[in-house]
Image: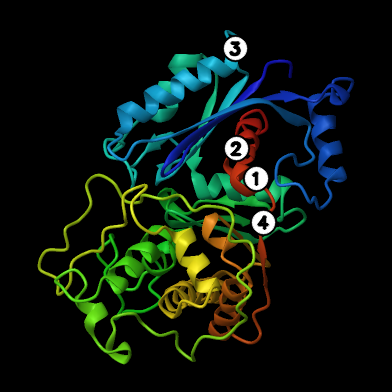
Amino acid sequence: MSEPILALDFGGTKLSAALFVANQKSHAKSAKDAKISSLRSWRPLRSLREPLSSYSILDRRRVFTPPDADAAYELAAMLVMAHELLAGRPPAAIGVSFGGPVDYATGVVRLSHHVRGWEAMPLRERLAVEFGCPVAVDNDANVAALGEHRLGAGRGVNDMLYVTVSTGVGGGWILGGRPWRGHEGMAGEIGHTVADPAGPLCLCGKRGCVERLASGPYMAADYAQGSRGAGEQGREASLPQEEMAIPRPLGGVRGGTTGEETTIPLPSGGVRGGAATGEGTEDPLPNPLPRGEGITGRGVAERAATGDLLAREILLRGAWALGVGLGNAANLVNPQRFILGGGVTKSGEAWWAEVRRAAAETALPEVRFDIVPAELGDDAPLWGALALAEGIFVD
């Protein structure tokens, strides 16, 4: 395949695009033989940037979206980046990772939880008309799962769940060596597994969801609220510690306090556009902090590492909630591996220890699995989008 493949990632707070070209060494073989060869030669890598593949990144672009961005703005910005990368060359195919529910069969975006205006957007059709080539569109967690399965920490694993813990919490399944999207493409929403029914209110309307407790912007908002003291917004922080509305992990919090790897920033900002108000509930929905204002999820992790008790409480509460969600998923589907990616996973060894402890405690003793970090880093959606586009010619 001589034409390049275009990979696009519509994230919660940023847009990324990459142009992939076939490696020269694979040109002497057929596309099928080159693909088989690369599959057999994959090995664990230290680099988070260039996994072994029959393709390599020729060029890339990335922009951060403003807090008031809408779908029209994001689509226009992505088209500009795509045309810059292509420089007049026709793409063989386009793979798209989108940060929200997607109907994979039709290529229609259901909605975005972060940016308004994406409801019922026929993204596959729009891009196919724009570039005149086949297009595949899927949810970002499904796409990242595909990337990790083909090129990252999921190589050789037939049954796995990839979970991104960042602006939100989402999951993508690989079962029997193939993506599993469920009925109408809604499988993998582990972020809205309820870990604590008496916990704080989530944007989805339920209480104590994994995303509400474990995602970076919500942890930052909880820390800001807890540190403000008395007042209508900070009423919970004025209560004695044993009465604070921060759920305690069942069985307590364990694990070390090394705080390693807190240098990768979390996407600041959070839920934008069309957020629920929480009217009629006992407490309002917390509003994740706008970009550039106050503490971020990364800041919570860093303060926890320096001994800040409130930060440590919130960080490990999130790790506990995620572990509960993973343990329940293990009981239900029995995957071999969980792969965790996203900025929050850089919160240090204490966070990882609590995730693994809570997952093991929640799962049945007979249910075996491992929990490992993603290998492709922030580029997982782009490499996954490449694999998604390659699949157009195979399926």
Crowd band around label 3 with a 10 angstrom C-alpha radius: few (<14), some (14–19), many (20+): some
Q: Kindly identify the amino acid type of the residue bearing the numbered disc 1.
A: Gly
Q: Position of residue 236 (x, y in %)?
A: 23, 79
* Residue 190 visible to an observer of this rendering: no
Q: Which amino acid, mark 4?
A: Gly
Q: Earlier in the sequence, mark 2 or mark 1?
A: 1
Circle 1 sits on which residue?
147
Which residue is denoted by mark 3 in the rendering? 90
Residue 115 visible in image = yes
Quarter holding residue 356:
bottom right
Which element is circle 3 on?
A: loop
Q: Are marks 2 and 1 in contact (CB under 8 Å)?
A: yes
Q: CA distance from mark 3 to mark 1?
A: 24 Å
> Which of the marked residues, 4 or 3, is nearer the chain's N terminus?
3
| Measured Cα–Cα span from mark 1 to mark 4 | 15 Å
Residue pushed farthest top?
Answer: 88
Mark 2 → mark 1, Cα distance in angstroms: 8 Å
Q: In the image, what residue occupies the spot 27% across and 35% down?
A: 117
**Which mark, residue 382?**
2
- Numbered mark located on residue 176 in the image: 4
Left or right: where 376 falls relative to 303: right
